[in-house]
Amino acid sequence: MSKRWYQENKRDPWRRDAKAKGYRARSAYKLKQIHEKFGIIRKGDAVLDIGCHPGGWTQVAVEEVGDSGLVIGVDMLATSSIEGAIVMVGDITEESTIEEIAGHLGNRRLNAVISDISPRLTGRYDTDQAISLELSTMALDVACDLLPPGGCFVTKVFQGAGIEGLIDAAKLRFSSVSRYSPTASRTASSETYLICQKRLQRTKGEVTAMEHLQGHLASIGIVVDEEDEKVIDTKVGFRKIPKRE
């Protein structure tokens, strides 16, 4: 841990406030600010938090849904229990995990899917941004499979090449799509949040969000030929993805 990192985090008012209020991460305030602006969670809602570890967003969701609501958090990393929430360990791309979520929902329908998922940062911006974009797009596909018409989806994504492909895919699935950068985000961070509201009755088009993104990347000249690269499996976020070196 560098001295500079330690000093910056020690001075971070959001981190200090999060610790004082009992939130597990400063990112809790990002969701609070998103909710304050867009009103994405209502009392009594059923909410799924994808990539919930360490639990800051899940804590905020529990506060917003109240006693009559339901919050389910899922991550491949074990997350300590959170009062008022169901916390699962699982890969959101696997059918067994989806079935477990459905079991917890019972007769309820999801109202919101939220995701503050991030890759394990490598320090190489292009690589980190590409992995984050893939994770966010995958979360969009999962959310659209689970959300009924009218539901909303929120995810983090790093600014950079290809982000317009994700936004375009979201617009085919939701009637309102916005980008928003909470003040709780670090000044030097390139992260932004995609706020997708009012899930459409039907997706415009037949391809998945991931296929749409891949087509967009190809259209702007970003094509990865994996046969020419050394690929090592590594777990990043909530599923196995190839780490390209």
Image (spheres, rainbow, N blue to C red):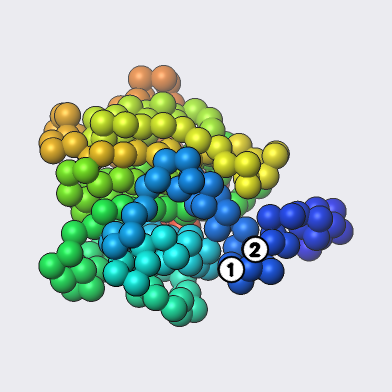
Mark 1 or mark 2: which is in front?
2
Residue topped by disc 1? 24
**Which quadrant of the view contains residue 1?**
bottom right
Distance from label 1 to label 2 (Cα)?
7 Å
Residue 2 position within the rendered picture, expressed as x and y whole percent measured from the top left: 82, 58
- Residue drawn 67% across the image and 44% down it: 186
Mark 2 belongs to which amino acid?
A: Ala
| Local secondary structure at mark 1 | loop
In the rendered structure, which disc, 1 or 2, sits on the residue that comes first in sequence?
A: 2
Residue 134 seen in the figure: no
Nearer the observer, 155 or 16: 16
Residue 173 seen in the figure: yes
Residue 113 position within the rendered picture, expressed as x and y whole percent measured from the top left: 33, 53
Nearer the observer, 79 or 129: 79
Residue 232 position within the rendered picture, expressed as x and y whole percent measured from the top left: 47, 55
Mark 1 belongs to which amino acid?
A: Arg
Residue topped by disc 2? 18
Is 24 drawn above or below residue 150 in the view shown? below
Nearer the observer, 6 or 39: 39
